[in-house]
Image: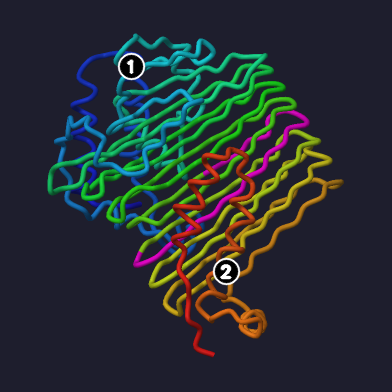
């Protein structure tokens, strides 16, 4: 248990301010705040495998303020995404700002514009009890403005950008807790861009949670971008539940922060679902980035693919952990998991631990992890063809990243990734 008393006092003060009035959402907050106070936050220690390599003291030991900026001028924030064929919503410091959606197939409710009902809050499947979900519980306990999004189309693709924006003008950190629930109705198709950004000089902790229900015969294309600033703390819990014949393709692109953790779980609740999870992460300086990627195979005849790649430089630290769990009864599961890393500095560190837990016969499953530098012979071959050492190394690093970037079908996003990732990747002079 993380027992930083000042931090616990601070979050309890926020909770008390939020929960002054009785409501459906206040009951949701109360249940989760009680769990946080009971269990505390996860502790970085041997034996606690989920948090073995990530120490939340980087978050809890900071000085926090309850004062949040009401600034809505976004001109000073880089990497906010707007695209002509997408609807856009901006969530600023955990609250929905200007809900202007023209697509009738996208319906949005939020606490500040409507009264939530029991049926609404029951959709938040991860109102969680017990241990190992403390970060999700903290999010719900401190969430000001839960947002519900419903996608209902059968003849077209609904497209939405969610910019999760953090702004702070004080000299202390603030904590923001955006929470979204997205339900994709039967036979619907949804393209979601989830973009996390913050003002360059702002100090903030963003603890976000997104739950997505992908109903029968529906499809989700999910693009996730972590562009928070170097001094920020970024925690995210994402839960995606797949019903019969549901399909999800996820592409996550992450740059490191002071501390970041992406906790993603796919639940295959019904037969014949398909999930493909691709990720590219890049760390530099003294950044710390933790990917915790899990698939829970409950139903039979489901397919899953995990393919993550990391590029580490300077004194940064990255983690890839997670599990593929194949439960009893989940026959004919087909699952593959892979994590590959390029370590460009002798001071950079990668901890990679993909795991399989299988409780049934008649499945196909495999996993693997690699970490290392660029092969000396490959570089020598490229030099023999007239390339400089620096150019050869940059081409090989870029080629390593392009396997994931090439998964992106949207041309605008693809071009942006070339500009913001590939063109900014380091070259490396090897000491052979």
Point out the tag, 2 or 1, that comes first from the N-terminus. Answer: 1
Report the number of numbered marks: 2
Q: How many residues crowd around disc 1 within 10 Å: few (fewer than 14), some, or many (20 or more)?
A: some
Label 2 Cα crowd, 10 Å radius (few <14 / some 14-19 / many 20+)? some
- Per the image, label 2 sits on a secondary structure element best described as helix
- In the displayed structure, does residue 372 sit left or right of residue 334? left
**Mark drawn on residue 91:** none
Q: Residue at x 72, y 41 (%)?
A: 327
Q: Identify the residue shown where x is 35% and y is 55%.
A: 257
Evaluate if marks 2 and 1 touch, with contact meaning CB atoms under 8 Å apart. Answer: no
Q: Where does the image place residue 207, in percent across and percent down from the top left? A: 35, 40
- The type of colouring in the image is rainbow
* Residue at 50% in and 77% down: 390
Which of the pair 26/303 is nearer the observer?
A: 303
Q: Is residue 26 left or right of residue 18?
A: right
Residues 293 and 399: in front is 399
Look at the image and tell me in which quarter the C terminus lies.
bottom right
Instruction: Please determine whether, in this image, residue 415 is positioned above or below residue 128.
Output: below
Give me the residue at 50% from left, 49% from top. 417
Spatial CA distance of label 2 from label 1 is: 49 Å
Q: Would you place residue 309 above or below residue 116 in this image? A: below
Q: Position of residue 427 (x, y in %)?
A: 47, 72
Q: Position of residue 117 (x, y in %)?
A: 41, 9
The magenta segment is 264-286
Judged by its main secondary structure, the magenta piece is: strand
Residue, disc 2: 395
**Camera-side residue: 392 or 281?**
392
Asked if the stretch drawn in magenta spans residue 278, the answer is: yes
Q: Magenta includes 92?
A: no
Label 1 residue SS = loop
Outermost residue toward the bottom in this view: 432
Q: Mark 1 sits on what residue? A: 111
């Amino acid at each position: 248990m993380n027992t930083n008393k000042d931090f616990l006092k601070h979050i309890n003060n926020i909770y008390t301010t939020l929960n002054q009035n009785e409501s459906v959402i206040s009951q949701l907050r109360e249940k989760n705040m009680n769990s946080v106070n009971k269990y505390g936050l996860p502790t970085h220690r041997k034996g606690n495998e989920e948090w073995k390599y990530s120490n939340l003291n980087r978050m809890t030991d900071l000085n926090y303020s309850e004062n949040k900026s009401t600034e809505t001028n976004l001109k000073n924030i880089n990497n906010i995404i707007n695209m002509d064929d997408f609807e856009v919503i901006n969530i600023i410091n955990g609250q929905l700002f200007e809900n202007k959606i023209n697509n009738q197939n996208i319906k949005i409710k939020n606490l500040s514009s409507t009264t939530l009902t029991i049926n609404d809050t029951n959709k938040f499947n991860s109102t969680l009890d017990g241990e190992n979900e403390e970060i999700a519980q903290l999010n719900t306990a401190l969430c000001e403005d839960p947002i519900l999004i419903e996608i209902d189309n059968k003849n077209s693709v609904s497209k939405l950008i969610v910019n999760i924006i953090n702004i702070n003008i004080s000299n202390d950190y603030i904590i923001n807790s955006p929470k979204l629930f997205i339900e994709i109705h039967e036979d619907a198709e949804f393209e979601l861009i989830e973009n996390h950004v913050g003002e360059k000089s702002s100090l903030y902790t963003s603890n976000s949670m997104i739950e997505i229900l992908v109903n029968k015969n529906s499809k989700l294309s999910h693009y996730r971008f972590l562009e928070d600033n170097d001094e920020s703390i970024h925690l995210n819990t994402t839960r995606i539940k797949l019903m019969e014949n549901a399909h999800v393709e996820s592409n996550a692109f992450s740059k490191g922060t002071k501390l970041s953790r992406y906790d993603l779980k796919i639940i295959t609740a019904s037969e014949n679902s398909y999930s493909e999870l691709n990720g590219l992460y890049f760390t530099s300086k003294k950044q710390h980035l933790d990917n915790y990627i899990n698939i829970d195979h409950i139903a039979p005849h489901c397919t899953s693919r995990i393919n993550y790649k990391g590029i580490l430089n300077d004194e940064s630290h990255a983690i890839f952990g997670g599990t593929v769990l194949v439960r009893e009864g989940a026959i004919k599961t087909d699952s593959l998991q892979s994590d590959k890393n390029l370590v460009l500095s002798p001071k950079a560190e990668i901890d990679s631990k993909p795991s399989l837990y299988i409780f049934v016969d008649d499945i196909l499953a495999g996993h693997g992890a690699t970490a290392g530098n660029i092969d000396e012979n490959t570089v020598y071959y490229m030099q023999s063809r007239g390339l400089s050492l620096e150019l050869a190394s940059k081409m090989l690093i870029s080629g390593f990243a392009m396997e994931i970037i090439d998964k992106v079908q949207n041309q605008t996003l693809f071009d942006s990734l070339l500009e913001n990732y590939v063109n900014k990747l380091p070259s490396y002079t090897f000491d052979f």
